[in-house]
Image (spheres, rainbow, N blue to C red):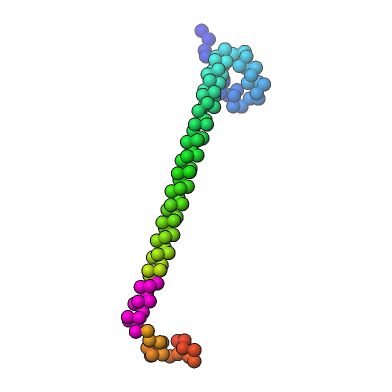
């Protein structure tokens, strides 16, 4: 009894196309394996556009989600910065009563800036 040939993968991967086709013509086991692989290849080619379209839809959704997240983050940062700035001005006017550095007792120069020695 003859053992089944298991050289298909080795010929397909490591040999030239001519050697591979020659072996397929000579070996019925590898010819059968090659026919099965051709059918699988045809099925993959048939469903490939479906998966590419699905991937494209997924990428579009991801891009929309990224844009929405960026917009929301930008909105919160701009509103938050404005609110913090407004609150800072209010706190300064309450605590310091809009006094200048000279009125607060800091040493200042002729321009009203605090002098550092």
Q: Relative to residue 39, is residue 104 drawn left or right?
A: left
Q: Which residue is drawn at the image coordinates 34% and 77% (left, top)?
A: 91
Residue 88: quarter of image: bottom left
Whether residue 116 is visible: no
**Residue 112, placed above or below residue 5:** below
Q: Position of residue 44 (x, y in %)?
A: 52, 27
Residue at the spot x=51%, y=24% of the render?
43
Measured along the vertical axis of the image, is residue 73 above or below residue 61?
below
Is 51 drawn above or below residue 65 in the view shown? above
- Expressed as whole percent of the image width and height from the top left, the position of residue 98 reads 37, 84
Residue placed at 34% from the left, 84% from the top?
Answer: 97
Q: Is residue 82 left or right of residue 6?
A: left
- 74 part of magenta stretch: no
Q: Quadrant of residue 29?
A: top right
Q: Start and end of the magenta stretch?
A: 85-97
Q: Position of residue 113 (x, y in %)?
A: 47, 86
Residue 22 occupies quadrant: top right
Name the spot of residue 42 as percent of width and height, x first.
Answer: 54, 23
């Amino acid at each position: 009894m003859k053992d089944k040939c298991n050289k298909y993968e080795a010929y397909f991967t490591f040999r030239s196309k001519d050697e591979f086709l020659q072996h397929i013509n000579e070996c019925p086991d590898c010819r059968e394996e090659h026919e099965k692989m051709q059918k699988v290849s045809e099925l993959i080619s048939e469903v490939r556009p479906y998966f590419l379209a699905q991937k494209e839809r997924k990428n579009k959704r991801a891009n929309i989600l990224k844009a929405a997240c960026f917009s929301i983050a930008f909105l919160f940062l701009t509103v938050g910065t404005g609110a913090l700035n407004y609150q800072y001005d209010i706190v300064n006017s309450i605590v310091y009563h809009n006094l200048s550095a000279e009125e607060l007792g800091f040493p200042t120069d002729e321009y009203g800036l605090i002098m550092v020695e």
